[in-house]
C-alpha cells in the first residue's frame, strides 16, 4: 500500500483527528474517471481515501493503472443532431392536430417527409411514421 511506517501512520492519524479531520478509506471503488474537456483520465482499481474537514470533502486517489481516453466522439454523439430540413413549430402543431398525434410523432413524420406537411400527414394516417 503506502510506503510508510505503520507507527508513523497511526501517529499522523491521531494528529489529524485532534485537528478535526476525519479520514477513512472508500471501499469497493472499481475505477475513477476524471473528465477534462476533450479527454478523460481513468484510474482502474484505485485506492481511495476520503478526508473531511472544514465542511469540505477531499478524495485522494492512488492507482497504478492509469490511462487517458478522448471524449470528443462521445460528446458529439450525445449532442442532438440538427435536422437538415427547417421545420417550424407551427407546422409541427398543425400536423399533430390534424393527424391527432403528439408533437414528437408529428415532428418525426415531418422530418421523414422532408418538411412536406401533406406527405407527413399521409405517413401518419397510413401508419408509416
Image (spheres, rainbow, N blue to C red):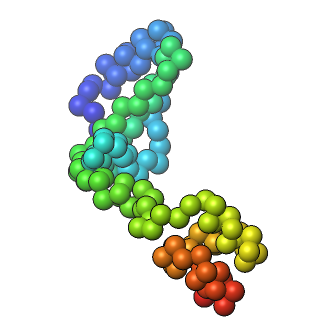
Residue 119 % position (x, y): 58, 83
Q: Is residue 43 visible?
A: no
**Toward the viewer: 59 or 95?**
95
Q: Is residue 15 above or below residue 123?
A: above
User: From this viewpoint, which residue is outermost toward the top?
Assistant: 19
Residue 52 seen anywhere in this rendered image of the structure: yes
Image quadrant occupied by the C terminus:
bottom right
Residue depicted at x 64% and y 72%: 105
Report the side of 45 relative to 115 (left or right): left
Residue at 68% x, 64% y is 93
123 horizontally vs 58: left or right: right
Residue drawn 74% across the image and 70% down it: 97
Q: Nearer the viewer, residue 78 or 56?
A: 78
Task: State which quarter of the image contains the N terminus.
Answer: top left
Q: In the image, is residue 73 above or below residue 107?
A: above
Query: In the rendering, at what x and y percent does residue 31 appear?
Result: 38, 50
Dividing the picture into quadrants, the one containing residue 88 is bottom right
On screen, residue 57 above or below 121: above
* Residue 80 image point, x, y percent: 45, 59
User: Residue lying farthest bottom?
Assistant: 126
How many circles with numbers are drawn on the protein? 0
Closer-to-camera residue (66/126): 126
* Image coords of residue 99 (percent x, y): 72, 77
Name above or below for residue 119 compared with residue 56: below
> What residue is drawn where x is 54% and y is 17%?
55
Left or right of 3 on screen, residue 75: right
Amino acid at each position: 500500500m503506502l510506503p510508510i511506517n505503520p507507527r508513523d501512520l497511526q501517529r499522523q492519524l491521531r494528529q489529524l483527528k485532534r485537528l478535526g479531520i476525519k479520514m477513512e478509506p472508500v471501499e469497493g471503488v472499481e475505477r475513477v474517471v476524471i473528465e477534462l474537456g476533450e479527454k478523460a483520465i481513468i484510474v482502474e482499481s484505485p485506492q481511495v481515501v476520503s478526508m473531511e474537514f472544514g465542511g469540505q470533502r477531499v478524495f485522494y486517489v492512488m492507482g497504478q493503472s492509469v490511462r487517458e481516453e478522448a471524449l470528443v466522439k462521445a460528446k458529439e454523439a450525445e449532442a442532438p443532431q440538427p435536422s437538415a430540413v427547417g421545420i417550424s413549430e407551427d407546422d409541427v402543431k398543425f400536423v399533430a392536430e390534424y393527424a391527432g398525434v403528439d408533437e414528437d410523432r408529428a415532428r418525426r413524420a415531418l422530418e421523414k417527409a422532408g418538411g412536406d406537411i401533406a406527405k407527413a400527414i399521409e405517413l401518419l394516417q397510413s401508419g408509416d411514421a
